[in-house]
Structure formats: C-alpha cells, structure tokens
Amino acid sequence: PIIKNELAKPEDLKNHNGINYPLVLKGINKEVIHKSELNAVKLDIRNKEELLKAAEEIQNNFTKYNFEVEEFLLQPFIKLKHEVLIGGFRDPSFGPVIMFGTGGKYVEVICDTTIKSAYVSDNDINEMIDSTVIGKILKGVRGEAPCDINKLKEIIKSSAQMLIENKNISEFDLNPLIISQDNSIHAVDIRIKWE
C-alpha cells in the first residue's frame, strides 16, 4: 500500500505538474531521519503558490540546522484517521523481531508498541494487534468502522518475512502507516537500514 511518490530537485519544483493537489511536501537529505524535527513536512498544499512557499520554508528550516535540501518528495495528501508503526530489527539475542503499535511523530512518547520474533504465526499477529491500544481502536470502537484488519495483518506478516529473507536489512520502519478516513491503509514513510 505504498502511496504514490514523486521526487523533485529544489530548482525543478516550480515546474511541478505531476501529483494533483492537495499534496504533501517533504524535504529530503540523507542525513535527516526525522523530518518533522526540522519542520520539513508540509501538509495539505492546495496550489502552486502554497507549494513554492512551503518549499522555501523547508529550505530555510534545513539551513538553520546546517543541512541542504537534496530533493523534495511530493505525495498526495490523505486525511488521516490513525497512524500506526510496523518496524523490525535484528536483536543480538533473539534474532529478527517485528514491532507494531501507534505510529507517527509521537511514537516514542505514546509508547504503545509490541515486539515479537519475526517468525510470527497468524495467532502471534492477532496478539500483537490486540495487545496495543491502537489495535483495539482499529478494530472499531464507539461506533467507528474498523479498518481493514486483514490487510493490516498481511502487511505485518510480509514485513516480518522481508526481514527474515533479507539478511542485509538491519532494521526498517513503516512510520507512519496511515489509516485514512475511509479506513484504507497507506505507507507514506519507509526507512530501511542496510548492514
């Protein structure tokens, strides 16, 4: 469920006519992992004027921290309902492990995650979802429709399998994996660290 992406060099942004508005603009530099800490993500951009203004703001924010925008990433803007995290890494004692929980920029503050061996069964995946607050919410509460839990389980399972099969991946995260207003699931930010 990877969302459509378009890369543009800063000097080419003024000629953008790819992804339709509204869109999201992210400043990219290989040294910058958490773009939100540099205020390098601008949401719900509705026209060319807003796009160029957002790009200028991101470039100024990068400059404050002695970084340069290498490229801009453009994505369709999706009205989000929830953000989840699916990640994995290689633990020295337990081998490959998979993580699931509340995602987004507050993941470290909210601390609603669970970790299991990447050799997960369907039952393990159910337990992972059920053991988190976000998992309970995604199943539907207070009259809200549930998200596509089966699709979410598939993503967890295939992410675990990716880590098992690719020994050169030391860690990865899909954060956030957006659950949209219509309860569809979209990967909007993916990070992979290679050994």
Image (spheres, grey):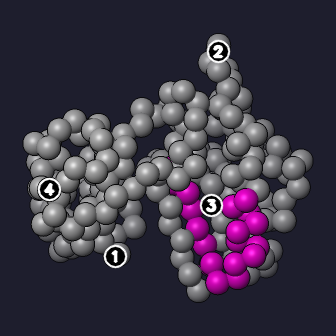
Q: Is residue 77 left or right of 182 when viewed as pictured?
A: left
Instruction: Determine which quarter of the picture holds residue 50.
Output: top left
Q: Which residue is mark 4?
A: 15
| Amino acid beneath label 2 | Arg
| Amino acid beneath label 3 | Gly
Instruction: Tell me the CA gap for discs 4 and 1.
Output: 26 Å
Q: Which residue is mark 1?
A: 31
Tell me which label, 4 or 3, sits earlier in the chain: 4
Please tell me which residue lies in front, 107 or 81.
81
**In terms of secondary structure, where does tag 1 sit?**
loop
**Tag 2–tag 1 contact (CB < 8 Å):** no
Q: Which residue is mark 2?
A: 142
Task: Answer few, some or many: residues within 10 Å of disc 1's Cα (few below 14, many 20 plus, some between 14 and 19).
Answer: few
Tell us which disc is closer to us: 2 or 4. 4
Tell me which label, 4 or 1, sits earlier in the chain: 4
**In terms of secondary structure, where does tag 2 sit?**
loop
Span of residues in magenta: 158-177
Measuring from the top left, give residue 103's x and y in whole percent: 54, 47
